[in-house]
Image: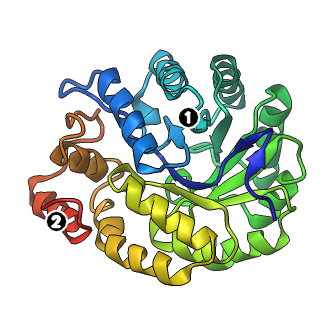
Amino acid sequence: MTNGTHGGIQIRGSIPAIVTPMHEDGSLDLPAFRKLIDWHVEQGSNGLVVVGTSGESATLSVEEHMLMIQTAVEHTAKRFPIIAGAGGNSTAEAIELSKHAKKVGADATLQVVPYYNKPTQEGMYRHFKAIAEAVDLPVLLYNVPGRTVADMSNETILRLADVPGIIGVKEATGNIDRAAHLIKHAPANFSIFSGDDPTAIALMLLGGHGNISVTANVAPKEMSQLCRAALEGDAITARRIHLKLLSLHKQLFCESNPIPAKWALAELGRMEGGIRLPLTPLDARYHDVVRDALRDSGLLA
């Protein structure tokens, strides 16, 4: 079983899929982004995924996408790993984004299953293999069929695990049977991360390597503590923290991610609440729902 170290960089534990702060007019708020990075370092996060789903990758221009990655790398200054969201439904575009990530000093890329064009399992295999061969930068696969429609099978993931440069997978189906199968059969140097906060504790206690988390956007200290406990086999502590965060896990998806997470961070005074169409600000009927979840988790008085 790997300890999560790849190329001298340890990718393990609590890795927030960080939101992209925006002003109310939708423009990027880089000062707020830098402050969020500092907060995550202080709170014990073990790395960041930048410009993933939670980072609104779908509505950033290519130039903005690259700027966010570069800003994260420069401001983090190697305090923890930066995993650059670099996926796409075009293999050529994913390769170009990966080349940029390597150029600016990212530690790895996160590559989502191509969406909308619904590739076959063989197409997925060739897509990810082409990226790994084109750019000398560690690749984390990302399977999230609830968003991409196309679902990468465990067989394809395990086949890709043998490709040099592909170091792990963000398993976001929430299906613990599938995750357990991967943990059992993956090569020793292949990392399995949860991409589903409600089931992350189970995946880690089964032998997974961490959680690429939405909840950690607003509860970085608590998620870091949960992951540390679970990875050390301390199920009692992990369970206590998990139950404390349970309502937050649920209500951060009362509307499409990252709508509730961005509202929660604004409510906590961490940034403005800007978001880009076609996503819209959190509906007023959910304000108290998310606020109550923050209180229930001990994050808001």
Query: In this rendering, is residue 27 above or below 128?
Result: above
Give the quarter of the image for residue 121.
Answer: bottom right
Q: Quadrant of the N terminus?
A: bottom right
Give the quarter of the image for residue 248.
Answer: bottom left
The residue that appears at 19% across and 24% down in the rendered structure is 25
The residue that appears at 15% across and 52% down in the rendered structure is 283
**Circle 1 crowding by C-alpha within 10 Å: few under 14, some 14–19, many from 20:** few
Residue 143 image point, x, y percent: 63, 55
Mark 1 vs 2, N-terminal side: 1
Q: Amino acid at mark 1?
A: Arg
Q: How many marks?
A: 2
Q: Which scheme is used to colour this image of the protein?
A: rainbow
Query: In this rendering, is residue 108 above or below 74?
Result: below
Q: Amino acid at mark 2?
A: Val
* Disc assigned to residue 174: none
Q: Closer to the camera, 130 or 79?
A: 79
The residue that appears at 38% across and 40% down in the rendered structure is 19
The residue that appears at 39% across and 62% down in the rendered structure is 222
Q: Closer to the camera, 134 or 227?
A: 227
Residue 46 image point, x, y percent: 55, 48
What residue did someone put label 2 on? 289
Residue found at the far front of this picture: 42
What residue did someone put label 1 on? 79
Residue 150 image point, x, y percent: 62, 55
- Label 1, label 2: how far apart the Cα atoms are: 35 Å
**Circle 2 crowding by C-alpha within 10 Å: few under 14, some 14–19, many from 20:** some
Query: In this rendering, is residue 249 above or below 79?
Result: below
In the image, 17: left or right of 281? Answer: right
Of labels 1 and 2, the one closer to you: 1
Residue found at the far bottom of this picture: 236
